[in-house]
Image (spheres, coloured by chain):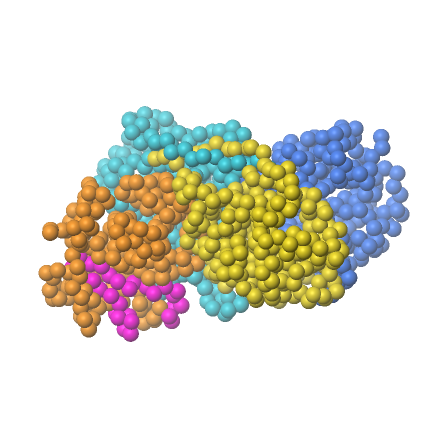
Chain colours: A cyan, B yellow, C orange, D blue
Amino acid sequence: MREAVAQHVHDGDTVVIEGFTHLICFAAGHEIIRQGRRDLTLCRLTPDLIYDQMIAAGCARKLVFSWAGNPGAGSLHAFRRAVETGTPPLELEEYSHFGMVARFSAGAARLPFWVLRNYGGTDLPEVNPLIRTVRCPYTGEMLATVPALNPDVTIIHAQRADTEGNTQIWGLIGVQKEAAFASRRVIVVVEELVDESTIRADPNRTLIPGFIVDAVVVEPWGAHPSYAQGYYDRDNDFYIAWEPTSRNPAALAQYLDEFVYGVRDRSEYVAKCGNLERLRASERVCAGVNYGF
Amino acid sequence: MREAVAQHVHDGDTVVIEGFTHLICFAAGHEIIRQGRRDLTLCRLTPDLIYDQMIAAGCARKLVFSWAGNPGAGSLHAFRRAVETGTPPLELEEYSHFGMVARFSAGAARLPFWVLRNYGGTDLPEVNPLIRTVRCPYTGEMLATVPALNPDVTIIHAQRADTEGNTQIWGLIGVQKEAAFASRRVIVVVEELVDESTIRADPNRTLIPGFIVDAVVVEPWGAHPSYAQGYYDRDNDFYIAWEPTSRNPAALAQYLDEFVYGVRDRSEYVAKCGNLERLRASERVCAGVNYGF
Amino acid sequence: MEYTPAEMMTAVAARELRDGEVVFVGIGLPNLACNLARATHAPNLVLIYESGAVGAVPERLPVSIGDPALVTGSLMVCSMADVFQSLLQNGRIEVGFLGGAQIDRYGNINTTVVGRYSRPTVRLPGSGGAAEIAIHAQRTVVISRLDRRAFPEAVDFVTSPGHRSKGKTRRELAMPGAGPTRVVTDKALLEVEPESGELVLSGLYPGIQTDEVKNGVGWPLRCRAHVDEVEPPTARELHLLREVLDPQRLYLKR
Amino acid sequence: MEYTPAEMMTAVAARELRDGEVVFVGIGLPNLACNLARATHAPNLVLIYESGAVGAVPERLPVSIGDPALVTGSLMVCSMADVFQSLLQNGRIEVGFLGGAQIDRYGNINTTVVGRYSRPTVRLPGSGGAAEIAIHAQRTVVISRLDRRAFPEAVDFVTSPGHRSKGKTRRELAMPGAGPTRVVTDKALLEVEPESGELVLSGLYPGIQTDEVKNGVGWPLRCRAHVDEVEPPTARELHLLREVLDPQRLYLKR
């Protein structure tokens, strides 16, 4: 992970760590904080705790997002402090989920924009001039548009991949495929490195082909406190505990000191967290299908 | 099948039987011929043998397509006769594969059009006025557009579905999902009807949700001479034999008399074809994945 | 029989759902309302979460819309591009649930900022999928406790459009869905008056006076010609909510 | 050592591929050329078929681009929307193979009609994915046997644009890819002359005279400053083609 971040994530980059609740790569976010990246434009539908931590650590210059909360637990207070008090300064570029998904879709298709029927009556276009309109060449009606989002680097956490980066994900797949194809560079972080034969045995399960992947990192528990279907559950207690932690700048700073700056890598983080085994997934293995002919 | 076609496919309808080489529902096409449907607008990327037969049988008024050949074997001669001699008259609306995929994508998203970077320098827009352009509201560049395609009915062949129509497909998935979501009515034809629990055991495998499906038909070998991955191989001999058959109108008429009009349903067709067992797929079952948490 | 406001709101919201409908579900009371409806009059309800889980049958109370329990045993998992384009924009979602820090006279909802956008007094999470749900769902049901601050005359920021935004109607804004047809509060049921697009009092909960409701909103609330008396939760509904759906009382305490 | 024109064309096409490239493959000679390259100098070639099979390793000679043998054991199967948007339009395809009934002076290809579009003398299959491959693949390799009818001065219908269409260059038409850089025939190798966008003779096969080639095209064919002598297939290449890749001689007979 250290090498992948050092090589592919630079100061000033537009960075995407995607994954909707599921497979959020905290391991990569922590490594980016440890390496002291600055002036990043962070993009995600749901900034979640990982971007709250990166904002608190001073990595972010700008946030591109659509829902900035702590699901079911409260607020992202580092984010709120930055916006409500202006310190540290944080530029916002705000959409709805559909708008962000459309931006990634345009980026993945290498089109300059995407068309959607949306935003009529909302105040979002008034605070975001990048939400525009286009006239349909058939019906003449006006439709909303958003510009393509093509990140410098996208980091995807997945259950498994082979050494070439052929990546398989199941459970919620969010917008990861679009984000990866939209990106100039792609880092895939996996729970498990598998043989190419495992990938080839079930090709319909592959979400990202290896030839668009620049680095593959093996990082078990790399998504904690987020989750990996079939590997470990979401650490909901951590999300609930983040509410008071992030509310108090000193407590947040202490968290970063202990669990990010205070560890050398993910394995030390896992050891420090203690009993993560309590989150280990139960067995609910599905049957395979026949690819014979 | 008889009821599904009688209820959902009407004279004058825009009909889609999708499936790219894989899972082409010949069973539905034959039933439509048997029921004597007329003035249909037939849409498919690759008309293939099934639309050649429907054109020969007089079902089609218009063809919307992007590649009309007999893959690796020759021509679709009923199609060619209609176009080259004008009898029977057949209106053409022609795109490239990307254009057809884009039309279904727009239809599935219920947008009036889709944007693509294509057709510059080709003669296609000159013979198809529905291929137009739009100006990007960000870069100012001109891009190609195609109009949405929203069929009256789409027929999808699949490996399996439950009684509600929750449908799972593996192997080549072509443009079936987009065609189904773009359609007013959807008929799913399956090799195997499975219990809902089989679907729920591997939800990432589901391509079409039951609530958009109007009818589920169980028709083993329903895709022959096309194929169903994991069930039976493509009948390449049939495709090769179609070249001389379709080249000769009398031979083509005789084929329809024997194998379409001459049988009551698919089971009689299968019996008449004789030894289809030679096409039975070998066992190449993949491993399952863990959905536990 | 005693019951909490949350229990009443959940029961009332559940009754808004018809069997077989395709519902865009949120976490908390909407999720409980949908599962209560499935356990009572609407066994064939199709639950869809914006995370991509379709036909979910959660074995535990999901704490987020991306909870793994929503995936395991569901009918389908789809990408978010499909959720918003093929399902929502396609018009397949019949009911959407919305809530918010502010709901105004015309059903406009604010989940973005309290105060000025550029330097807000309170920065809220933002739209998420709410803006498109408000525009595309065939109808939406809003759940929120009555409170003058939560029900101002006009919201500070329109995140999810209601029946009139900047003086324009939904038709003028070419919105496919019917918008917020019902607002389920802890004291009464509000509904939209078609002609004016304004929220009016349509149903009073047991023991609640009209004035208590009027005092809970920031505009002169009018009453529908006939105001219903809303039935309290039945013993069966309360049993399901307390023993089966939320035994730890995560959402139904108050 | 004896060899057929098809064997020579396949060997020459295979040499056009570099190891590790992502190739959009067609059926027949292109498929054989790719598998020959994989078996010789380009083991890491990624084969993609427009049907959606990525990283295919067919156990048998596929008779169609949708052959089930292309799926079994492949690295990924994707929808055709992904094939055309996320792979091709995205610029990920480095080499595309094209063929056609007519190829003209500027590398424009016709696979649509011979004669008038409205009432053609011969109705051809149409574009399929050829139009977008010609526009988006970083470069394309065309394979076709020399014949005046197959190489007219100008095609009857431009299905896949070459280097100049209606007097416009690829840059003027804003095409991302470089277009047909090489045309592999049964007698010689043609390549595009950058300045003019015209196809010129760049390599002669063993024993072929320049005039034979000039007589095979419908325009005054010019020669590149230096015309190469193209190497015949090696014994290893012929062994692989005959014993391993096409033992039934489906495509290599003539």
Q: Position of residue C151 (x, y in %)?
A: 21, 62
Is residue C183 inside the magenta stretch? yes
Residue in the foreground of this view, choosing between B289 and A135: B289
Report the span colored magenta. C171-198
- Residue B244 shown left or right of residue C52 in the figure: right
Could you say where residue C123 lies in the image, as x and y percent from the top left?
27, 53
- Quarter-wise, where is residue A249 in the image? top left
For the residue pair A224 and C28, the one nearer the viewer reads as: C28
Query: D197 or A139: nearer the eye?
Result: A139
- Residue D85 in the image: above or below residue D118: above
**Coordinates of residue D95 in the picture (x, y in percent):** 65, 43
Check the image and report above or below for D246 versus B237: above
Q: Is residue B125 above or below residue A251?
A: below
Percent across and percent down for residue B287 are: 48, 32
**Residue at the image point whose x is 85% and y is 47% from the top:** D213
The residue sitting at 20% across, 62% down in the picture is C189
The residue positioned 25% from the left and 55% from the top of the image is C14
